[in-house]
Image: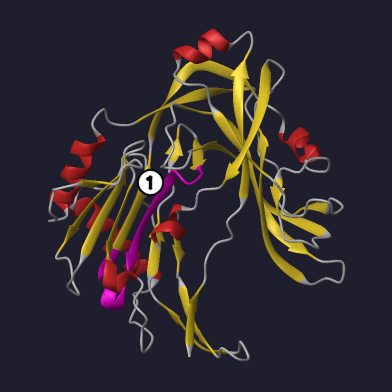
């Protein structure tokens, strides 16, 4: 038999580097100029689908502040501190690509690895042989309510819960990675296991949520409710005195019909929008980021011409006017740090 784990689709991203004209000096005072993600559709060359709005459009203020993001001046010392809080060896190894790592009880079933990023201060911590172990039977995972309590107490005990995390039972989300056993010849799934339950905490800057690969705080619980991994890709931020004129949500919705700022399955005839929200963008933890723009995050489900459900789609749209900005699109591969670290 062969095992295959589910993974996220790696998407191509156009990172729009925003360069101001009249506002250049003011933005420069706030730090490096901000970037904004724009998904390149996987449906290129196919007619743009019909969009159905299955939710209400958000009420948008006339202006929103540019956020200044910041990390510690000494991320190496910070990671050593995290290692100490977790009871790990604080002798860090550097891989030459902006990563620091330490491994404790190497070569044993209790091996633990802590990996951090210089550019952001984000880190992974995991029990290497437990987090993605192939189970012989369904692990005993706690129910969501109990999982939230275990995860939150763990973060508090080790001083790993950021001040801007929304640590409330009705605000966190839960995810169960699945591992399937399938027959190699036919591809038929024989059985599937939920290998862990992840408690995922949302982040908020000012009055808006934060989205992007740099805004992740996950605690993974394994068999018996043991903590087997923590992902904290987290930047702090504060508002600057740079106020940006917003794009009305109705205008952003109209732009969906003419742009390729979406990632969606091929064959999508109708895109049912289930979420249309304002958010700030947090860049990949591999990248340095000094400022953040507000944007619209758009999510929903795709349906084919025959009514077949094709899965979800994701998109981003500008939430601030670009009249005074010169847009310079530079395509690069999207970072999915969850997949990279397993």
- Vertical relation: 161 (above or below) 247: below
Is residue 224 rendered magenta in the image? yes
Query: Could you say which quadrant of the image residue 258 lies in?
Result: top right
Q: Residue 156, percent across and down? A: 22, 51
Q: Which residues are magenta?
A: 211-228
Relative depth, front residue between 147 and 130: 130
Q: Residue 97, percent across and down? A: 36, 42
Position of the C terminus, as image quadrant, is bottom left
**Residue at 78 percent of width and 42 percent of height:** 256
Is residue 227 rendered magenta in the image? yes
Q: Residue 210, percent across and down? A: 49, 41
**Element type where label 1 sits in the image:** strand
**Residue at 87 percent of width and 52 percent of height:** 47
- Vertical relation: 260 (above or below) 111: above
| Left or right, 309 with reference to 338 | right
| Left or right, 129 with reference to 77 | right
Which residue carries the number 1 mark? 233
Inspect this view and state whether residue 92 appears. yes
- Vertical relation: 251 (above or below) 222: above
Q: Residues within 10 Å of mark 1 (few under 14, many from 20)?
A: many
Q: How many marks?
A: 1
Relative depth, front residue between 240 and 167: 240
Relative depth, front residue between 243 and 191: 191
**Residue at 64 percent of width and 22 percent of height:** 62
Inspect this view and state whether residue 56 appears. no
**Residue at 37 percent of width and 42 percent of height:** 234
Relative depth, front residue between 323 and 54: 323
């Amino acid at each position: 038999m062969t095992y295959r784990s589910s993974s996220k689709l790696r998407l191509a991203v156009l990172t729009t580097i925003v360069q101001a004209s009249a506002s250049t000096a003011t933005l420069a005072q706030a730090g490096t100029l901000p970037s904004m993600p724009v998904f390149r559709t996987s449906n290129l060359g196919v007619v743009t689908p019909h969009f159905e709005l299955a939710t209400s459009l958000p009420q948008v203020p006339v202006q929103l502040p540019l956020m200044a993001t910041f990390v510690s001046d000494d991320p190496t010392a910070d990671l050593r501190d995290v290692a100490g809080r977790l009871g790990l060896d604080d002798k860090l190894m550097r891989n030459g690509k902006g990563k620091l790592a330490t491994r404790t009880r190497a070569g044993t079933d209790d091996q633990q690895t802590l990996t951090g990023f210089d550019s952001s201060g984000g880190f992974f911590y995991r029990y290497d042989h437990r987090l993605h172990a192939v189970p012989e039977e369904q692990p005993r995972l706690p129910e969501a309510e109990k999982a939230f309590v275990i995860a939150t107490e763990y973060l508090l005990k080790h001083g790993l819960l950021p001040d801007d995390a929304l640590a409330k039972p009705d605000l966190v989300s839960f995810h169960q990675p699945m591992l399937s056993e399938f027959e190699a010849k036919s591809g038929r799934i024989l059985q599937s296991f939920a290998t862990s339950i992840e408690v995922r905490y949302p982040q908020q800057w000012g009055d808006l949520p934060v989205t992007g690969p740099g805004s992740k705080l996950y605690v993974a619980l394994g068999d018996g409710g043991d903590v087997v991994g923590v992902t904290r890709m987290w930047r702090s931020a504060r508002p600057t005195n740079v106020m940006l004129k917003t794009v009305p949500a109705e205008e952003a919705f109209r732009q969906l019909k003419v742009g390729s700022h979406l990632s969606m399955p091929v064959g999508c005839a109708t895109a049912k929008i289930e979420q249309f929200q304002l958010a700030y963008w947090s860049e990949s933890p591999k990248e340095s980021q000094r400022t953040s723009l507000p944007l619209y995050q758009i999510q929903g489900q795709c349906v084919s011409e025959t009514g077949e459900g094709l899965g979800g789609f994701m998109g981003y749209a500008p939430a601030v006017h670009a009249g005074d900005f010169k847009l310079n699109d530079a395509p690069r591969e999207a970072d999915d740090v969850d997949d990279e670290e397993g």
